[in-house]
Amino acid sequence: MGARITRLAPILLLPLVLWSVASPAHASADPELRRLLKEAIESDSGFEDRFDAQVWLLDMSRRLEKFVKSPRARIELLKRVHYEARRVGIEPELVLAVIEVESRFDEFAISVAGARGLMQVMPFWLNEIGISDQNLFKIRTNLRMGCTILRYYLDMEPNDLGRALARYNGSLGKTVYPNKVISALHKNWFKQ
């Protein structure tokens, strides 16, 4: 019986989600967001089904709004984050928390150490892998490299997210950075 209810939950929730997306309050507040969500759901963006895509994109877009004002930019970024995170087997919410702490969603951010872009990837990585013509300010390149690097450190520290995050940040042995990311993850990105 419980398995049957679990399988039916998405079907039972669909009218509620569709109502919330199509309700006059949402439609009049941000019709562009509705259009962008529809396009995102219908495009190939790494989602396994349209319902999951609609729910995740709507929820995360609302959360991301305090950092990124443009609905189009939010949806495009979320699609790319979701795709790149899932490509390497990381939860997209963790990537969003890393981006929040690293760059506050500024795709042109440069750290004092010279790290660049959303995930603050160090430029030496481009030379290390022989693609020095790539631009770390391109969202796709930055996310692809940042997610790959993060995955590597998660594999290196399989049971310790804090140590993996510290490795990513170059602060192994310290807890300030991992605590910031974990706090952002719980405060802003985990589904509640």
Image (cartoon, rainbow, N blue to C red):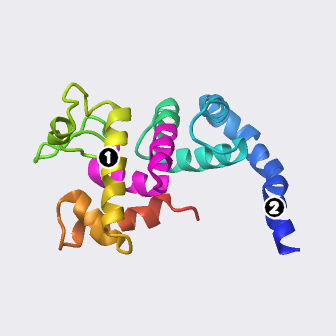
**Image point 18% across, 68% down: which residue?**
172
**Residues in magenta, as a range:** 78-105
User: Which residue is located at x 43 percent, y 58 percent?
Assistant: 94
Q: Above or below — where is 51 with respect to 158?
A: above
Give the position of the C terminus as an image quadrant. Answer: bottom right
Q: Label 1 amino acid?
A: Gly
Numbered disc 1: secondary structure: helix
Q: Position of residue 178 (x, y in %)?
A: 29, 67
Mark sitting on residue 146: 1
> What kind of secondary structure does the magenta stretch mostly adopt?
helix
* Quadrant in which residue 137 is drawn: top left
> Does 101 appear above or below 36?
below
**Residue with the most extreme front position:** 130
Residue ID at (38%, 33%): 140
Residue furthest top as drawn: 133
Q: Which residue is mark 2?
A: 7
- Left of 22 or right of it: where is 155? left
- Between residue 169 and residue 74, name the one nearer to us: 169
How many badges with numbers are in the image?
2
Say if the magenta span includes residue 90.
Answer: yes
Q: Tag 2's secondary structure?
A: helix
Residue 78 vs residue 192: left or right?
left
Mark sitting earlier along the chain (1/2)? 2
Q: Nearer the viewer, residue 135 or 149?
A: 149
Q: Residue furthest left?
A: 113
Report the residue at 65% width, 35% height from top.
Answer: 41
Residue 27 percent across, percent down from the top left:
69, 35
Q: CA distance from mark 1 to mark 2?
A: 35 Å
Q: Quadrant of residue 126?
A: top left
Three-letter amino acid code of the residue under disc 2: Arg
Crowdedness near tag 1: few (<14), some (14–19) or many (≥20) residues, C-alpha within 10 Å: many
